[in-house]
Amino acid sequence: MNLEVKSTEYRRNILKYIYKAKAGHTGGSLSCIDILNVLYNEVLNVSPETFTSPDRDRYIQSKGHCVEALFVVLADKGFFPESDLETLCKYQSHYIGHPTRKVNGVEQNTGALGHGLPMSAGVALAAKMDNRDYRVFTLMGDGELPEGSNWEAALTATHYKLDNLCAIVDLNGLQITGPTKDVCNTEPLDKKFESFGWAVRHVDGNDVVALKEVFDALPFEKEKPSVIIAHTVKGKGVSFMENELKWHHGVPTEEQYKIAMQELSPAP
Amino acid sequence: MGNEILKAPIGVTGAANQDVFSETLQELAATDRNIVVVTSDSRGSGKLVPFGKKYPAQIVEVGIAEQNLVGMAAGLASAGKKVFAVSPACFLTARALEQIKNDVAYSNNPVKLIGISAGVSYGALGSTHHSLHDFAVLRAIHNIRIVVPADSFETIQAVQQVAASEQPYYLRFGKKPMPLLDERGETTFQIGKGRVVRRGSDVAIIANGETVYPALQAARKLSAENGIEATVVSMHTIKPLDEKLLSELAVECKAILTVEEHSVNGGLGEACASWLLKNRYHKPFDILGIPDEYTVTGSQVEILSHYGISEIGIASRVKTLNTLT
């Protein structure tokens, strides 16, 4: 199955389980799903069989609220039966609104923002100390970038030359209050990371082919941590959800759900 | 090192607990390359400069950035490192509290958080540098054990035991030289089990950290001058609390006083009070700690003395309690 088709399948599942749970972060999960698709199907050396290996690549999702994207990918990769997602956000389910290690395949419990990068830097530093070749990836939202802990870690990652660390910013441009540039402008983001000593690349974060190419180019510079600024569309793939703030954690009605699933019909 | 200290006679001025921590960790690092210290420009106050010189590949400096200190420590621990994250207790447990809650405790990454220069150790540097809240906030977080050694013996034992544990811990140390407390020749130490350093049937004094020694002095004074015999306990582990020992003390003694270098709110005293009340203890009880006010200024000794956390102050409070029995 090619990556584009896989992305459509994932988007359908994201909506399916958010619709069933009547809860979820719809817009952000749809913006970042292509990134997760390429990571888990083309980049990371993780599988249910290798998940306890000390040499596995690590993926830590800093923007934990977009957990539905992570769950549908982990289910597809066989970490747990997809039917488990029927319990999403239900009483006593492990499949809650943020990643927890009680779910097979999840590396760290996240949800509070600004935590993924410091933890990822720690794991990447451990790899350097142990002369292991694994890499560490963390997905951050553009809305969480004002958290100061990110920039503390950005300094340390450069200090320790963590070229086995890759941060991906899901730059969909919207956060719960409004456009990120109006809430707390973080642009020019590339210049900021560059000035912190990072190697920076921009990519269309909803283009799976472009994503694969940029991941294949890691590390962008030897002895520097890498950041991929992934330009994405919040709500990507469903016309009435795209770039619409209300879909940050909007749940579709039955009619909206049907329309969305028609739009996301598998390619003939 | 350990044996020599253990044989030292009672009352001899010893080493500061945080210095003993550093020495113990060096010994452990000699045979375990997975021991890693993470510091936030705190290796000097943590007496870790020798560690850094001896094991440069096993020390990680993050600069003055406590959130990152704890986040990175969690990442390192998740990858198999035995991580000791060392920072002044005041900053570690306030600035980085969310990282402690989520990255260490909730994610179950077995970081050993080391709060140095704790309580009012920093004296006249003022409230920014005091940690009188750490027991309270950490007690309310699931999956972190809180240990506050009183002397060199407890410190060595605690550091060795937590290094071998795969659970998150908070260890709290002061920087004042502390005498040994082995009045009864105790040689066993177990996290979660209070250490009885003196036996008496009138009053139980339950203390921890640097307050155990003045509690012991107060007990001797009470015995010599007032005929009041006090049990003195180093309740080094606040969480999990030694409920078995508490229940024994509740039966054996006519009154209980707790002593701590912490706010009277949410610390050792309230932990004991809660358990005792729930278990139908109705004898006299009091909590001696730092009251809920802007702390008086002065050195550590002056501040503690001001609030009665001293030989004289503790003895005085015990006498008052004793009149109620």
Image: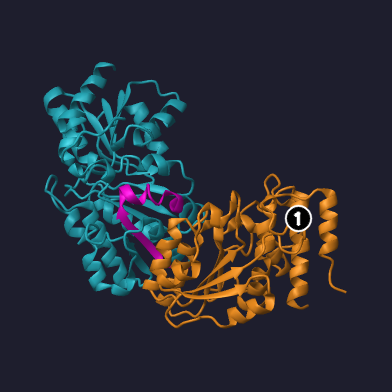
Chain colours: A orange, B cyan
Q: Residue at x 24, y 34 (%)?
A: B295
Q: Nearer the viewer, residue B94 or B284?
A: B94
Question: Does any portion of residue A112 appear in the rendered image?
Answer: no
Q: Residue at x 23, y 72 (%)?
A: B53
Q: Residue at x 52, y 77 (%)?
A: A134
Quarter-of-image position of residue A150: bottom left
Image spot of residue A4 (x, y percent): 75, 74
Quarter-of-image position of residue B54: bottom left
Q: Residue at x 41, y 44 (%)?
A: B138
Left or right of residue B104: residue B308: left
* Amino acid type indicated by mark 1: Tyr
Image spot of residue B316 (x, y percent): 19, 24
Q: Which residues are magenta?
A: B79-100
Quarter-of-image position of residue B140: top left
Q: Nearer the viewer, residue B141 or A178?
A: A178
Q: Nearer the viewer, residue A42 or A172?
A: A172
Left or right of residue B222: residue A178: right
Examine the structure image and report whether residue B81 is included in the region drawn in magenta.
yes
Q: Is residue A221 above or below residue A187?
A: below
Examine the structure image and report whether residue A47 is included in the region drawn in magenta.
no
Secondary structure category for the residue under label 1? helix
Left or right of residue A171: residue B304: left
Q: Nearer the viewer, residue B117 or A112?
A: A112
Q: Quadrant of the image for the C terminus of chain A?
A: bottom right
Question: Does any portion of residue B84 appear in the rendered image?
Answer: yes
Marked residue chain, label 1: A
Image spot of residue A11 (x, y percent): 75, 63
* Extreme-top residue of the structure: B324
